Amino acid sequence: MQTETLSATISGADHLVVHAVWNPDGLSVRFADGCQCFAPATDVLKGLQSLPTRVQIDSKGPLGVTLYFGKQKEFYPWDWLRYYGDPLHRAKAAAHIGKAKAHIGERVRLARKSAGLTQQDLALGSGVSRATIARIEADQGGVTLATLTRIAAALGGRFVDVF
């Protein structure tokens, strides 16, 4: 079973990235100089069909973070991650995440209706309870990326394509 939060830490000031954490919202990275960066899950998971199962800090060769998705792996270079620590980008990212979270229920409802499914149909196809789907569609919060990924798969697509 996959955990919701994965982390990796590497010690020593000679490493560029010293801590990385994956959670349902995205990838948090702390650099040796103290800069903290957060890359939203929607950016990290573009084109991928599953959630990460492991996170690793790469300190030799290309510097950055590798996320493992079962047998597949994706490398995120340090400069791509550092971009998310830029103060101007952080403000834009916070607004984007807030907007995305505020409308996720509406997107789930529209995608479900577009597929011609009832809440019960979607519940059966995704393995998520009908009550949970109703709560998500009502924007009552507390939804995880893992749940949304299961719902997207039941709707015939990937999270980034459906929502």
Image: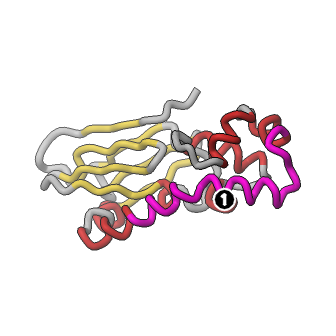
In the image, residue 97 lies in the stretch drawn in magenta: yes
Which quarter of the image is occupied by the C terminus?
A: bottom right
Residue at 33% in and 61% down: 81
Which quadrant would residue 36 be assigned to in this image?
bottom left
Q: Position of residue 82 (x, y in %)?
A: 28, 63
Which quarter of the image is occupied by the N terminus?
A: top right
Q: Return the residue nearer the eye: 149 or 65.
A: 149
Q: Position of residue 148 (x, y in %)?
A: 63, 46
Residue at 70% in and 41% down: 134
User: Does 31 sit left or right of 159 as displayed?
Assistant: left
| Magenta residues (range) | 95-120
User: Does 58 sit left or right of 145 as displayed?
Assistant: left
User: Does 71 sit left or right of 112 as displayed?
Assistant: left
Question: Dot 1: few (<14), some (14–19), or many (≥20) neighbours within 10 Å?
Answer: some
Q: Amino acid at mark 1?
A: Arg
Q: Return the residue nearer the eye: 129 or 80.
A: 129
Q: Return the residue nearer the eye: 60 or 76.
A: 76
Q: Secondary structure at mark 1?
A: helix
Q: Position of residue 28 (x, y in %)?
A: 34, 49
Figure check: 69 above or below 115 = above
Q: Position of residue 83 (x, y in %)?
A: 31, 68
In the image, residue 2 lies in the stretch drawn in magenta: no
Residue at 62% in and 40% down: 147
Q: Residue furthest right?
A: 116
Q: Residue furthest bottom?
A: 88
Secondary structure mostly seen in magenta is helix
The residue labelled by disc 1 is: 107
